[in-house]
Image: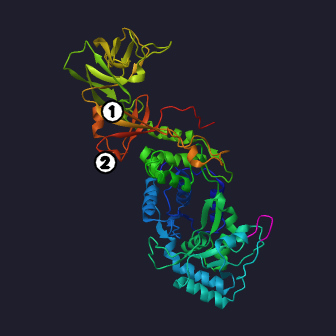
Amino acid sequence: MDNKTSSSNFIRNIVESDLKEGKVSEVITRFPPEPNGYLHIGHAKSICLNFELADEFKGRTNLRFDDTNPLKEDTEFVEAIKEDVQWLGFEWDELHFASDYFEELYNRAVVLIKKGKAYVCDLTADQIREMRGTLTEPGQNSPYRDRSIEENLDLFARMRAGEFKDGEKVLRAKIDMSSPNITLRDPVLYRIAHAHHHRTGDSWCIYPMYDYAHPISDAIEGVTHSICTMEFEDHRPLYDWAIRESEMESEPHQYEFARLNLTNTIMSKRYLKMLVDNGIVDGWDDPRMPTISGMRRKGYTPEAVRAFCREIGVARANSVVDERMLEHFIREDLKLKAPRTMAVLQPLKVVITNYPEGQVEMLEAENNAENEAMGSRQIPFSREIYIERDDFMENPPSKYFRLFPGNEVRLKSAYFIKCEEVVKDADGNVTELRCTYDPETKSGTGFTGRKVKGTIHWVEASQAVPAEFHLFEPLLLDDAEGEDDKPFLERINPNSLEVLKGFVEPNMQEASGNDKFQFFRHGYFNVDPKSTDAGRIVFNRIVSLKSSFDVKA
């Protein structure tokens, strides 16, 4: 793994102390997603933390799917998550599913019943909620709380056998209905769901709740450090209770850290699913989505994502990270990797009237001025080229150094040209420029006769490759803070995607999905891996070239 850091954080300090004091002999962590959607940038932080922590101390990390809710889970999500973890650069030591443990989980629930620690309850979900109490008022005992052990064992077995309808009965832990921690007020351990499971099919019609299945699964796998986000802090006493009372041999411990929040970024799976279901985005891997698959399609690199996750660190206090920090790490990773080339996103034709008709010459251009090892390429030049439409102004303001009537500029890696004539259509729109060039000013010849203040990029017209460019803005018009009452879909930016059609250099004809380039003045771009399916090249802008963000600030 590249650039590993051993910088201190409170979880790392705990692990180091546990090893030193002999509390554990080997560090075993796990990344336990529920396969009910695609992973996002917040999950990337958890993935990096779990895998890199175990790797640093020569331990192991399991990938486990907590697949206990068949109504929302699917094999599609399982495969997508596996791909995301591997793309980030990690390999799990063991692959598990909570459904692997359904029989063991059932047997441990029977242990709880036999100890008088669990009972079958006939209350509805709404009734359970109403009787749970509030932060200032204790809950009320269920009228079924004192069923005998024999009756509970019988009813639980019949639940498994499919004798009852969905919602007709649940298995609840018997803990304390007056506990100040509401999580401990007889939580539900099992519910009935006559639903097809993506792995076990129709073998089960009762399914364990996350708060029960998760700690038992950790214990079965011998996990030593169960790392989760802060919203599970109140669940830690239940985590410990389930392991202790079900008499598991292994005793994992749960540790919580602050989840990642990014400015102008949607982190809720529910909201992300809403965007997909409403057709606002092009699927879970839309480049505007904060999903790992979306970032991959946009052109982010795993090295940059890992570096970003290390930089933001691990803490218990919640905070919001500026999205520009992530973009900073993208630029830092790509600046020496991405070949530099020219692309015209909004083309304006230029005819060089004194250049020989029918002649095409090849010019040499550097692939990356900051990385000489990337060498150079040959680019064609002829009488007709395309430049950016906004590199010309008929009536420019002061200190405008690009092309305007009578002004001279340098064409990058080529010649000086001077605007002599502006051609317009019947509506007064500029359709073409007619320029002259100075053959003595060829780049690389050492010409010092005069200087020009402007350099613009271009693409030779006859061999230019048509391309589509996708430019992105945040999906959210504002940050979430203070906007909770505003309907989510009203906060979506209707201009989050701009599509432009222009040209790239002919050597780009061979570009394939996920190839990355720096387009002169425009930024870093990635070949959309889905564009080749449509027989056209689509470039997604990964990030612009510059930002005012200072990572050291």
Task: Say which residue appears at 47% left-offset and 68% top-offset.
Answer: 94
Q: Nearer the viewer, residue 161 or 436?
A: 161
Residue 457 coordinates in the image, percent (x, y)? 37, 24
Residue lying farthest right?
136
Residue 172 coordinates in the image, percent (x, y)? 66, 77
Query: Can you tell which of label 1 and label 2 is closer to the viewer?
Result: 2
Q: Report the number of numbered marks.
A: 2
Please report contact status of discs 1 and 2: CB closer than 8 Å, yes or no: no
**Lower position in the chain sequence, tag 1 or tag 2:** 1
Per the rendered image, the range of residues in magenta is: 132-138
Task: Say which residue appears at 65% left-offset and 62% top-offset.
Answer: 232
Task: Say which residue appears at 72% left-offset and 79% top-offset.
Answer: 142
Say whether residue 90 is visible: no
Q: Secondary structure at mark 2?
A: helix
Residue 210 coordinates in the image, percent (x, y)? 59, 69
Q: Nearer the viewer, residue 130 or 321?
A: 130
Q: Which residue is mark 1?
A: 375
Type of amino acid at the residue the image marks with label 1: Gly
Residue 453, by quadrant, is: top left
Residue 300 coordinates in the image, percent (x, y)? 46, 44
Circle on res. 533: 2
Type of amino acid at the residue the image marks with label 2: Asp
Residue lying farthest front?
426
Q: Secondary structure at mark 1?
A: loop
Image check: 381 left or right of 150? left
The answer for how far apart the CA atoms under marks 1 and 2 are is 31 Å
